[in-house]
Every structure is written in structure tokens, then in C-alpha cells.
Image (tube, rainbow, N blue to C red):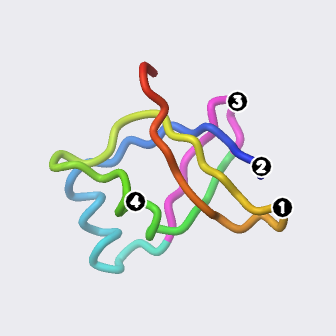
Amino acid sequence: MPSIDVVIRLTRDECLAHYEGRALSVHTRSLDGRKVVFPTSALTRIVGRDGIDGVFRLHFSTAGKFESIEPLPGR
């Protein structure tokens, strides 16, 4: 399964925009500089009280469909 490491930094208010449906996808960059877009639904697994701030590994199917997200510790 292909994967890509991305930095996600969203404030509490920015996360709220995703939950309220004002934002349907997340736009960020990979560690190697590529633009990455994935569904807002992925945020439910990683959002904290203050938002999201960290490095995460996104897993995709071979067809390019988002499958899962996991935090990368120590980054």
C-alpha cells in the first residue's frame, strides 16, 4: 500500500470548519514538498482539543484512494 508523510497544522477553529462541512478536504504538503489532498473525514482520528499539529503517514490504495492515517512519533 503506497504511503506519504505529511505535516498537518490546523488550529481548533480550522478543524471546526472541517467538521461543520465548510471544508471538504485537507490540503497540505508532504515532507518532500509534494501537494497532498485527502478527505476531511480522516481528521476525526487525529484531532485533539487544540487542533492538529504533527507529522502523519497517509496510506492510499494502489488506485490512489485514501485508506488510513497514523501519527509519526518523535517528529
Which residue is disc 4 drawn over? 43
Residue 29 is inside the magenta segment: yes
10 Å neighbourhood of mark 3: few (<14), some, or many (≥20)? Answer: few
The numbered mark at residue 2 is 2
Nearest to N terminus: mark 1 or mark 2: 2
**Whole-number angstrom distance, CA of label 4 to CA of label 3:** 21 Å
Which residue is disc 3 drawn over? 32
Give the residue drawn at x 64%, y 64%.
Answer: 66
**Callout 1–callout 2 Cβ contact below 8 Å:** yes
Secondary structure at badge 4 equals helix
Q: Find the residue positioned furthest to the bottom.
A: 21
The numbered mark at residue 11 is none
Give the residue drawn at x 76%, y 62%.
Answer: 61
Which of label 1 and label 3 is nearer to you?
A: 1
Image position of 66 with respect to 6: above or below: below
**Whole-number angstrom distance, CA of label 1 to CA of label 4:** 21 Å
